[in-house]
Image (cartoon, grey):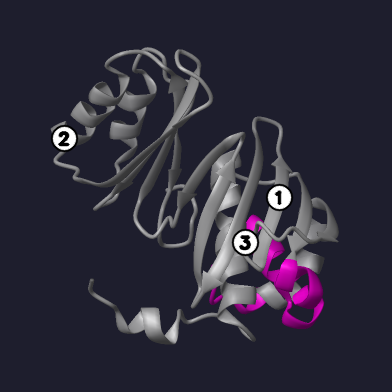
Amino acid sequence: MSISIFDIIGPVAVGPSSSHTAGAVKIGNITRSIVGGNVDSAEITFYGSFAHTYLGHGTDRALLGGLLGLAVDDVEIRNARELARKAGLRYTIATSDDPRFHPNTVRIVARNGVRSANIRASSVGGGAISLDYMNGYIVGISCNLPTLIVPHRDLPGTIAAISHELASDNLNIAYMKLSRAKRGGSVVVVFEIDSAVPVDTRERIRNITGIDDIIYISPLHGNNI
């Protein structure tokens, strides 16, 4: 396993903590990607260490900054509460504890006029995160690479069709995970790709029979591109 110097020292980010601030920004970014743009409202629940220290570490501001589309090194994160007010982002913050979860865990129910997202994610250190749960599915992905999340009906040949579209644009699958509630029902498949996935490729995948949606997460800031 190769280790980057950035895995050791963490990202360039607004402090004070890579796990409590940089990781929280990324979780907000990813939530924004899942709803497909601007977030109108968010119900935020912090767990464990997040719940006990979010005010002192600015985790609430970091998460709001991510929901607003700010990058981890944007100093405007410090003003995220005021920016959220100006943007019309309505939010609530609650705290809880659940021993099953990583100590730095947050659950977010986010909405806009088009789409909603119910996610649970954890900040696992050094600015790295894990998207653990999304809209009823256990996903467990890092989003370190360009990531496609594709909910679809459980039909034969669907994953092969998605893989074909990726291969036709010379896109290599680094990791794939499938989660389904029951056979023949709804499924979500996650692909982590070695390089960015062009808009045209995503649209071809979206048009495959049985595809319900396609969510793309860029590893740079967690935003759609």
Q: Secondary structure at mark 3?
A: helix
Residue at the image position 71 percent from the left and 32 percent from the top: 113
Q: Amino acid at mark 3?
A: Gly
Q: x and y percent of residue 102 in the render? A: 62, 64
Q: Which mark is residue 167?
A: 2
Residue 165 quadrant: top left
Query: Mark 1 sits on what residue?
Result: 108
Crowd rating for badge 3 (residues with CA inside 10 Å; few <14, some 14–19, many 20+): many
Q: Amino acid at mark 1?
A: Ile
Count of numbered circles on the image: 3
Q: Is residue 184 left or right of residue 201?
A: right
Residue placed most toward the observer, 93 or 86: 93
Crowd rating for badge 2 (residues with CA inside 10 Å; few <14, some 14–19, many 20+): few
Residue placed most toward the observer, 87 or 205: 205
**Extent of the magenta region:** 48-76
Q: Which mark is residue 66?
A: 3
Spatial CA span between label 1 and label 2: 34 Å
Q: Amino acid at mark 2?
A: Ala
In this rendering, the answer to whether 75 lies above or below 192 is: below
Q: Residue furthest front?
A: 99
Q: Secondary structure at mark 2?
A: helix
Residue placed most toward the observer, 196 or 183: 183
Magenta stretch holds residue 4:
no
Specify the principal SS of the magenta part: helix
Residue at the image position 53 percent from the left and 52 percent from the top: 131
Where's the N terminus, which quadrant?
bottom left
**Mark found first going from the N terminus, 1 or 2:** 1
Residue at the image position 34 percent from the left and 33 percent from the top: 202
Magenta stretch holds residue 50:
yes
Front of the two marks 3 and 1: 1
